[in-house]
Amino acid sequence: MSNTAIPLCVDLDGTLTRTDFLLEGLLVLLKQRPWAIFLCIGWLLRGKAHLKEQIARRVTIDVGVLPYNTQLVDYLKLERSTGRPLYLCTASNQRFADQVADHFGLFDGVLASSADHNLLGRNKAKALVEQFGDHGFDYCGDALADVPVWRQARQAIVVGDRHLAAAARKVNAAIIFFENKRHYLPLVLKEMRVHQWVKNVLIFLPLLSAHRFSDTAAVLAACIAFASFSLCASSVYLLNDMLDLDADRRHERKRSRPFAAGNLPLSFGIGLTVVLAASAAALAALLPWRFGVVLVAYFATTVAYSFFLKRLALIDVFTLACLYTVRVVAGGAANDIYLSYWLILFCVPVFLSLAMVKRYVELDGILRAGQMKAAGRGYITQDLSILRSFGTASAYLAVLVLALYLNSPELQTLYRHPKALWAVFALTLYWVSRIWMFAFRGQMHDDPIVFAFKDRVSLAVMGLCVGSMLLAI
């Protein structure tokens, strides 16, 4: 019998699309209503099919922006052009499957899970045999759970790695193989945003301000704190990206993130998030209990930011400023270093200014792209001018606090040559002005602190500031 007379049945999750509808729907639901996790546990006790049905009733997924397997889509279009019947056969809920089928307009029918029937593995094989007969269809899948279906199919079509293809060959001799080569380590490091760990260098600032940078034990404790904060931050980055899939897929640059692009499975991301958070907690246990309290506060605040605070205009930038400042507080807690009010009064406005730079750059990019509103944010492009005003005012307020500190009596007791610190004042004034000038010109990285550690002039300014402090000491 020719191929054109044999129905081609295609799986959805991991095959036609590089994602999992159950996990996508679960993340959308939890983003909208975090407390729904308790409902999900109850639904799961009534069966996985019931869980899928309840989630599908409550969430909406835009199937138009999902990451699809373009090589497979091209193959399906070619088969369709020959008159071959195509069927979408998936364990995902019927609601989602129908939306995908309507999006492509290629399929003659849809077989999917209902409220009381999970169309997976043997259940799927049985349903296909009942409709098309034993070996009366070809099946395209991506997982070991598809082996029972391939066993009943005329031909196994594999999307995935060669190990899966080998498993398919054991039950069916003929295979069309779509190989997706992925180098997972670079993808994991990219998703963890290791380059963002430079922000945690702020943990070492209390050592410098307390003149304890030559204390080996203190430096070691600060390094442990740095590692703990970095792993904790990465766990939240992963969670944030999994909660932000829809918005990221609409963003010109963020759509290439591994989860948004479907290059890393969401199930892997959930597991890695737990491992990173647990590792951060284990490192925190080696430090004073105050550091653990600060780390928990940081984690809770960043999770709250990921769920809803980032959607609130101004609240989001104040939260970011607090999260930057918390890193300095954590550095003090790791070594029981008292942080002066001067240091906190300087950190809050300067970090608020940098947070507004970050938001200003995002809005500016949206305006240049001809859009009016930031997806998933509480800003419109008309807010650019007010962000610019608030941000520059905060920057110069921080410089003013620094000037007042340099004239305070406390300074005389800490430094032998306090006048050398006026170089820090001049350098800081120059640096914040330059940061905002770059933002106005559209030449700024969307995170100014990461930009600072890549920019030669900024690195030179930091080096001169540290040199001035050492000279003053």
Image (cartoon, rainbow, N blue to C red):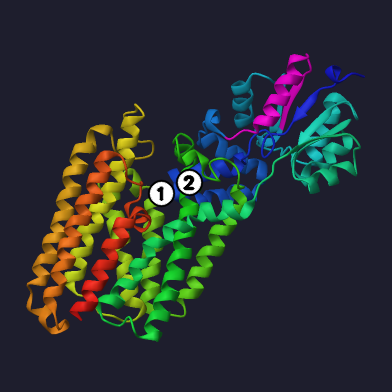
Assess disc 2: are there few (<14), some (14-19) or many (≥20) residues with their C-alpha within 10 Å of its C-alpha: many
42 falls in the magenta region? no
The residue that disc 1 covers is: 307
Indicate the position of residue 212 as horizontal and vertical percent values. Answer: 30, 83
Residue 451 in view: yes
Residue drawn at point x = 41 percent, y = 50 percent: 306
Q: Amino acid at mark 1?
A: Phe
Q: Nearer the viewer, residue 69 or 36?
A: 69
| Residue under the point 31% across and 77% down | 207
Q: In the drawing, does residue 231 fall left or right of residue 1?
A: left
- Residue 243 bears which disc, if any? 2
* Distance Cα–Cα, label 1 vs label 2: 8 Å
Quadrant position of the N terminus in the picture:
top right
Are dots 1 and 2 in contact, CB under 8 Å?
yes
Residue 339 in view in this figure: no
Q: Which quarter of the figure has residue 370? A: top left
Span shown in magenta: 67-89
Residue 323: x and y in percent read 32, 60
Relative placement, left or right, of 230 versus 201 is: right
Q: Position of residue 193 (x, y in %)?
A: 48, 55
> Camera-side residue: 31 or 245?
245
Q: Does residue 75 belong to the magenta stretch? A: yes
Q: Earlier in the sequence, mark 1 or mark 2?
A: 2
Q: Is residue 114 above or below residue 267?
A: above
Query: In the visual, does 84 lie left or right of 348?
Result: right
